[in-house]
Amino acid sequence: MRSVTSLTEPPGDPQAMTIDELARRVGMTARNIRAHQSRGLVPPPEVRGRTGYYGAEHLERLALIKDLQSEGFNLEAIRKLIEGAGGSTGEVLRFTRALREPFEDEAPEIVEAGPLAERFAADPDSAAEDLRRALAVGLLRPLGQDRFEVRSPRLMRAGTELRSLGIAPGRGLDVLEQLRGHADGVARVFVKLFVEDVWKPFEEAGSPEERWPEVLDALERLRPLATEALVGAFQIVMTERVEERFGQELERISVDQERSEEVA
């Protein structure tokens, strides 16, 4: 999200801007600014004589609106967020930044097309299809000019280890597609938990301004909690499934041996 620092520190008296000067500062038209005022998104100017003057608060609010629009929020959603924060641009900005902050705890890697193709060259006949699938599942993101972003180097390293075990890239992608489906279900569980147990009670209470820090804290704490809970649950279930499956395999081997001895 773009910083608003340059828009909130105008030189000289910040209250001395006309609407045309404000429009130039924020890169909007005066008509758009008036439209935002009519929707209740921007507070009215201070009127001196017959001229309205705008200051730092207006700069900050308009910069926030542009940032939120670039993130996909429509004007009605922006209005509700601002109203819920009691008009506090800072609270809305902090919340939406936390909301949009990636959950990944690892830095992505940038790779060139050549080295990337080598990673999928174990089966030349399916290399192009494997690359397409890696893009579709979200492991890779094209950046243009034959460059790609590896969104999770951890997953890419796991794929490399699988290949070292003799497992083809396509088979590893089969697993990744299944994992993504399961992970989507887990993510929905935690999003639903936050919305129903934190956000809705806050909204039903009238979105009191003093509780915004509490909501923001809950959102930020949810990130590590979701990861820890998922890993902990997976470890328990993985242990149970390994014991169950290999118990069946050992039983099958024992039965096969008994049958072989009977035939002999």
Image (spheres, rainbow, N blue to C red):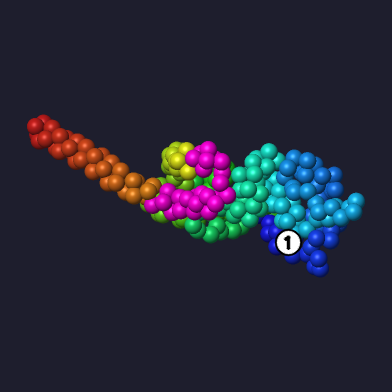
Q: In the image shown, does 201 or 119 lie closer to the viewer? A: 201
Q: Outermost residue, front direction?
A: 49
Q: Residue at x 61, y 48 (%)?
A: 85
Residue hosting label 1: 8
In the rendering, at what x and y percent does residue 120 appear?
A: 52, 50
In the rendering, at what x and y percent does residue 167 appear?
A: 41, 47
Q: Residues within 10 Å of mark 1 (few under 14, many from 20)?
A: some
Q: Quadrant of residue 248?
A: top left
Residues shaded magenta: 200-228
Q: Residue at x 34, y 46 (%)?
A: 234
Q: Residue at x 46, y 53 (%)?
A: 221
Magenta span dominant secondary structure: helix
Q: Secondary structure at mark 1?
A: loop
Q: In the image shown, does 248 or 48 lie closer to the viewer? A: 48
* Up/down of 260 relative to 140, above or below: above
Q: Is residue 155 visible?
A: no
Q: Is residue 207 magenta?
A: yes
Q: In the image shown, does 53 or 192 lie closer to the viewer? A: 53
Q: In the image shown, does 128 or 241 lie closer to the viewer? A: 241
In the rendering, at what x and y percent does residue 80 appear?
A: 64, 41
Question: For the residue marked with disc 1, what is the amino acid?
Answer: Thr
Q: Is residue 239 visible?
A: yes
